[in-house]
Image (cartoon, rainbow, N blue to C red):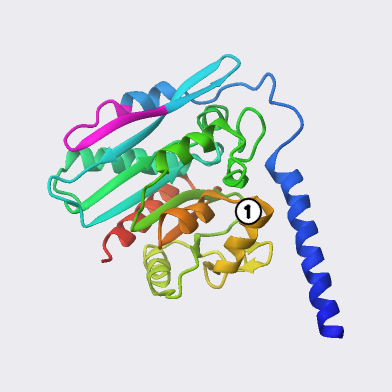
Amino acid sequence: MKRRTKLTWVLVFVLLAGWTGYHIYLKHPDPYQHVKAVRDLNEIQNRLTLVKGRMTLRNIGEIQYPSFKTPMWAVCVEPVSPPTRRCLLVGGVHGNEPAGTETLLRFIEQLSANENAYPDTAFDIIPVANPWGWVHNRRRNYERYDLNRDFAHFYTQETRLIRDFLRGKRYDIALDLHEDGTAAGFYLYQYAEADPGPARDLIAKERAAGYSIAQEVWMVVLRSHDGLIRAPMWTLYFVRAIRTMSIGNIMRLDYSGRAYTLETPSTFPMEKRVDMDMIAIRHFLSRP
């Protein structure tokens, strides 16, 4: 009886924490006002319009706010022969985490320059998922939604465009690139995958490259162990039930059997953050 009572209180606490998190993290009451732009989307557009070969630059929809209008871009790469695997790469869900966007732009440029790279792989790449946030260096979008809590409700223009682009697709691997302003090193999330081997091998490569690995990182009830946070399937069903899903959650539940969120430390120089992300992308693409 005591055990059942304890479990009931744990469940009540978790539900209350989820409800509180919804209100704290998903949306603030008012849109941003009088926020200065610190980056120019024309720089991204200019780089993307140079892609060639087997790449296609797609406008998957438009983001519109007062005095702000932009396409959301996806770069789609199809190999000459039928692909043996498909890969989804997403960056810039949080606008104040620019390293993921820069990594994906460079990766796109590398693929464009070398048509023989990954000849058996099809890619869908969304380099900047939160254009307004990226321009203004804000975590959230103009309406103050945290996009990485909105992949269940789809309140925002951005998450709806991504949902519509991904509808009906299936990937062999999906990577979501983020940064952590409080982390002392690299770490990653692994979603509902029994084998930690690929993630552990990546952590070993990051360490061998001279990068520190974050220790004791917490995400609500999940804790990292030497740079790896393993999110079991029940946690994904739980966040779907309380409707605060991240893009990593929905990647694993709906679009891919293998999904990871990469986290680089925001306090590191941009070049180091990009290098950490590149090591991770190359690592996962090198595996069968």
Whether residue 276 is visible: no
Query: How would you rate the neighbour count of disc 1 (Cα within 10 Å): few for under 14, some for 14-19, many for 20 or more?
Result: few
Q: Is residue 95 above or below residue 188?
A: above
Q: Is residue 56 magenta?
A: yes
Whether residue 19 is visible: yes
Q: Residue furthest front?
A: 168
Residue 267: % across, % down: 56, 48
Residue at point 50%, 18% (across, down): 69
Residue at point 47%, 58% (across, down): 252
Quadrant for the N terminus in the image? bottom right
> What amino acid does circle 1 point to?
Thr
Left or right: 1, with 132 as reference point: right
Q: Which residue is mark 1?
A: 182
Residue 72: quadrant of the picture: top left
Q: Is residue 267 magenta?
A: no
Residue 8: % across, % down: 81, 72
* Magenta residue span: 47-60
Residue at point 59%, 40% (across, down): 147
Left or right: 182, with 20 as reference point: left
Residue at point 29%, 30% (across, down): 57
**Which element is circle 1 on?**
loop
Quadrant for the C terminus in the image? bottom left
Residue sitting nearer the eye, 278 or 237: 237
Residue sitting nearer the eye, 175 or 97: 175
Q: Is residue 262 above or below residue 226?
A: above
**Exactly how many numbered labels are in the figure?**
1
Residue 273: % across, % down: 45, 49
Residue 139: % across, % down: 61, 38
